[in-house]
Amino acid sequence: MTTPHAWKHGWADAYASRNGDIAEEFLDLVVKPSLSALGQKQLELASSDDLVIAGFAASDHRDLINKTNMAFCLSIQSLWEQQLRRYLGNCVGCLGIEGVTAEELEHMTWGERANKLFQYIRGTDLTAFDSYATLNKLQLLGNACRHGDGKSSRKLFKLHPELCPDQYPSVQFVRWSVELLASFVSAIVLFWMDMEILGLESFANEDARVLARIAHLRNSRESRLAIVTRST
């Protein structure tokens, strides 16, 4: 890999057009209903007249909620990683880009390696996207959920102490919320919105439909940007 390729629109971009919608559907149809049901059950257990249920069962249920949040964080992280890896692989295929193997993409890790591959394949800086900081937060938190306390968690809490303001922060005591998980999904949606804008702008024409779509995307992204900005 040497000189980055200039942006060129292709069928890979068309295939990626629903990536943001898919992430949002997972949040709305799976994450939110599940956490709402678990939260309601927690209230029922905590208000029980049976002291054993109100004490031990409620405590166990809180742990279940915590583990469920961790599982959903991992799922969102995995969804994002797969989308990005598949997109770059499709770009390599449809644009005939040389110098990138399927094995490289398969083992692509978030961070410097992913940034270099994205820069080479798409000719633009991944870290310059408004969604990058929140996507990086997702990656660090997902890794901490997967591996437990360690290098990723230390970096995570250094960058985002608000996630666990305890004196001795641990992934086991992260302050989970639906809003936190929703901010990760909004970052994914925002990224793919910006990718579509870049693609449409690459046409460099005055077609009214293209200009209208760009205007719509720019207007729609503002609400996503506000959510993502608050999360960082």
Image: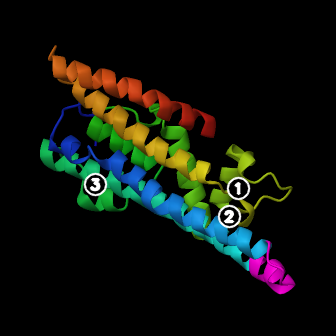
Q: For the magenta stretch, what is the residue range?
A: 47-59
Packing grade of label 3 (10 A; few <14, some 14-19, many >=20) is some
Question: Quadrant of residue 64 in the image?
Answer: bottom right
Q: Secondary structure at mark 1?
A: helix
Residue 31: horizontal and vertical position, in percent? 50, 61
Tell whether label 1 touches label 2 (CB within 8 Å): yes
Among the two numbered marks 3 and 1 on one chain, the one whose residue lies closer to the N terminus: 3
Mark 2 to mark 1: distance in Å? 6 Å
Q: Nearer the viewer, mark 2 or mark 3?
A: 3
What residue sits right under mark 3 in the picture? 86
Picture coordinates of residue 73, whole percent (x, y): 54, 60
Position of 63 with respect to 30 (left or right) is right
Q: Quadrant of the N terminus?
A: top left
The percent coordinates of residue 68 (x first, y second) are: 59, 69
Q: Residue at x 62, y 71 (%)?
A: 67
Q: Residue at position x 46%, y 31% from top?
A: 128
Q: Which residue is mark 1?
A: 154
| Above or below for 202 versus 122 | above
